[in-house]
């Protein structure tokens, strides 16, 4: 299996509400058969009904974890601390809940987190050690190089 992700599908309770949230962040989606697709750099983020997603994956939908955290955090890396603050503010204005205000990180960066209307957690981060291309694509450094 190649080391690649093509799609990230988020199970949501209300397609229209979730689409409106992401479009309020400036994303542009296309809806096909009750599924919304957003091109996100070299991959796509998809919104699909939570129950349908669970059934399609062959798993039981037992609802959100007891603590509301499903063990996954999506990350949106940006070029500066100011951009972190801007994206968090835009997310809050669109209806997100900021779960961690932006602050300096242990790795010398700057980051904060929010939850979308269905509880999916996003980290907005500036990591000076990660190179971002003009299209926002991230290139990991060679961690073994000194």
Image (tube, grey):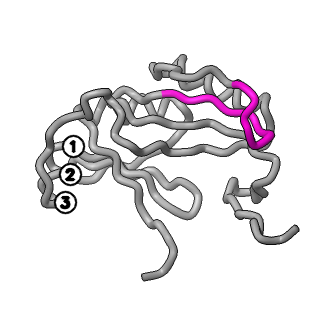
Residue found 31% across the figure and 27% down from its top: 67
- All told, the count of numbered labels is 3
Vertically, is 36 above or below 105? below
Residue at mark 3 to residue at mark 2: CA–CA distance: 6 Å
Towards the viewer: 20 or 106: 106
Q: Nearer the viewer, mark 1 or mark 3?
A: 3
- Residue at the spot of label 1: 49
- Residue at the spot of label 3: 57
Discs 1, 2 touching: Cβ within 8 Å: yes
Discs 1, 3 touching: Cβ within 8 Å: no
Vertically, is 82 above or below 60? above
- Residue at the spot of label 2: 53
Residue furthest toward the right? 146
> If the image is split into quadrants, where does the C terminus sit?
bottom right
Residue at mark 1 to residue at mark 3: CA–CA distance: 12 Å
Towards the viewer: 78 or 17: 78
Q: From the top left corner, tell me how far across and down residue 117 is, in percent.
A: 36, 26
The image quadrant that residue 7 belongs to is bottom left
What SS does tag 2 mark?
Answer: helix
The residue stretch that appears in magenta:
103-114
Left-right relation of 47 to 75: left
Towards the viewer: 57 or 142: 142
Residue furthest toward the bottom? 1
The image quadrant that residue 19 belongs to is top left
- The crowd level at tag 1 (other Cα within 10 Å; few <14, some 14-19, many 20+) is some
């Amino acid at each position: 299996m190649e080391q690649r992700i093509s799609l990230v599908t988020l199970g949501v309770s209300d397609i229209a509400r979730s689409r409106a949230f992401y479009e309020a962040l400036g994303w542009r989606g296309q809806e096909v058969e009750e599924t919304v697709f957003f091109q996100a750099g070299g991959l796509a983020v998809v919104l699909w009904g939570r129950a349908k997603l669970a059934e399609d994956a062959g798993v039981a939908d037992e609802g959100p974890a007891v603590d509301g955290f499903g063990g996954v955090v999506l990350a949106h890396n940006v070029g500066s601390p100011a951009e972190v603050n801007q994206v968090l503010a835009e997310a809050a204005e669109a209806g997100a809940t900021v779960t961690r205000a932006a602050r300096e990180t242990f790795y010398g960066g700057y980051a904060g987190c929010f939850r979308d209307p269905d509880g999916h957690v996003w980290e907005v981060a500036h990591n000076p050690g990660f190179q971002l291309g003009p299209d926002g694509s991230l290139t990991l450094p060679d961690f073994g190089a000194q």
